[in-house]
Amino acid sequence: MGAPSVAPAPGDTGAGGALSARARALSPSPTMAFDARAKALRAQGRDLVNLTAGEPDFDTVAQAAEAAVAAIRGGFTRYTEAVGVRSLREAVAAKLRRENGIAYDPDEIAVTTGAKFALYASMQVLCDPGDEVLVPAPYWVSYPEQAKLAGAVPVFVPTEEADGFVVRAALVRRCITPRTKLLVLNSPCNPTGAVIPPAELAAIGEVVLAHPRLFVLSDEIYEKMVYDGAQPGSIAALDPELRRRTVTINGFSKAFAMTGWRLGYTAADRPVARAIAGFLSQTTSNVTSVAQRAAEAALNGTEAAVAAMVAEFAKRRRYVLDRFAAMPGVRLRPPGGAFYVFPNVSAVLGGRSPAGHPLPDVDAFALRLMEEGGLATVPGSGFGTAEHVRVSYAASLAELQTGLDRFEAFVRAIS
Ligand SMILES: Cc1ncc(COP(=O)(O)O)c(C=O)c1O
């Protein structure tokens, strides 16, 4: 089977042919579909450990929650500027200057409905039909689909597992054609956790500079979740011309445990920023007013809660890496960031599950692990690989222990 379906399958003419070609070509988000299936099984009373989550299992930082309550009580409940209130954009600009070394004017910032819509809006204003969008693989599930929604063509830049899935400048250069318009960078990466080292980022910057038509979408949403001294860096900080041709994307979901608030932003040179502002004005309008107040408080508040969360992630990561290192048939290189591991399970594919179902591929592996093994993960197929599953460690150590006991029991039963 593929991922449990939440949208028409490609090729399905749907609703008596009512659906657009665009809707029919869209692949549903497999991460959300597996998470939904896991939640449904749990709702039925099944004993299931769910390690599919792409969200921190921490409470939203307190200062943000309190600011939102105050905003509601204070009647801050009307439309705002489509790109978000100026004070929030000032706070974002200050953050980018302070932490990332990039100077943006508040008018070059647009607050969006999650980083997901920041990416979508950016692709919509930068890509024409037929343009090629370079997506390093394995990739976060939404990049290729959003490129297609803009009429563009995703082109996958291969990375090597043996090289820690790091995006290499030489591989990027090899994929560039006269039609290439955008390069997507995501460091730390979902799903692999790979962090592009500073020297490689500089080399990628040189490749971009050598191709005047090329723009960069730099998705930096996992920037705070780094371990063992990994340094992600911001490509827009490296050179004024790179700043001009980069849209820096970030958000509040991961760093401040605010997934449900739907808060992200773009930072881009003025002409691109203006186009994004126009696009937002005709699509979502502003992000929820009270959420904007929460975002501002998060950015201006203490980083102590963020640091505590990252320290906890670091502990869990160590535990998860140690567990996988002791498992037969599973290969895993320690990733530098995010809160996922991406073990290679190809050595145990091809046989049968403990209940006798065939396991030809990672989709079947993840499905049987969930249904028989009581552990939900996400198969790599949605991320562009046939050999891996994504395991999130945004879960308590107790859940991780039970979950990895189940992973181990499952692979031992089929190895
Ligand atoms: C790499 C990456 N970018 C962007 C997002 C979107 O985050 P949000 O829309 O919640 O800000 C996610 C969420 O999982 C992600 O993993």
Image (tube, rainbow, N blue to C red):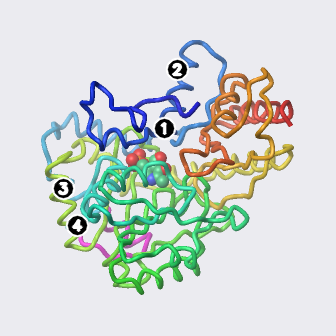
The dominant secondary structure in magenta is helix
> Given the image, on which type of amino acid does mark 4 rest?
Ala
Separation of residues labelled 1 and 4 (CA atoms): 32 Å
**What kind of element bears circle 4?**
helix
**Is mark 1 in CB contact (under 8 Å) with mark 2?**
no
- Determine whether, in the image, residue 350 is placed left or right of residue 297: right
Image disc number at residue 59: 1
The residue positioned 34% from the left and 43% from the top of the image is 262
Residue at mark 2 to residue at mark 3: CA–CA distance: 36 Å
Which mark is nearer the camera, 1 or 4?
4
The first of marks 1 and 3 along the sequence is 1
Q: Which residue is mark 3?
A: 279
Front-most of residues 232 and 4: 4
- Earlier in the chain: of badge 2 and badge 3, it is 2
Q: Please give the name of the residue rendered at 63% of the width and 16% of the height, measured from the top-left corner.
A: 46
Q: Secondary structure at mark 1?
A: loop
Residue 13 visible in the displayed image: yes
Total labels drawn: 4
> In the rendered structure, which segment of residues is drawn in magenta?
92-105
Residue 162 pos. (x, y %): 73, 65
- Is residue 382 positioned above or below 268 on the image? above
Gap in Å between the C-alphas at discs 1 and 3?
32 Å
Q: Could you say whether the residue bearing mark 3 is in a helix, strand or loop?
A: helix
**Mark 2 is on which residue type?**
Ala
Instruction: Give the image location of residue 135, x and y in percent.
Output: 48, 62
Q: Nearer the viewer, residue 325 or 415?
A: 415
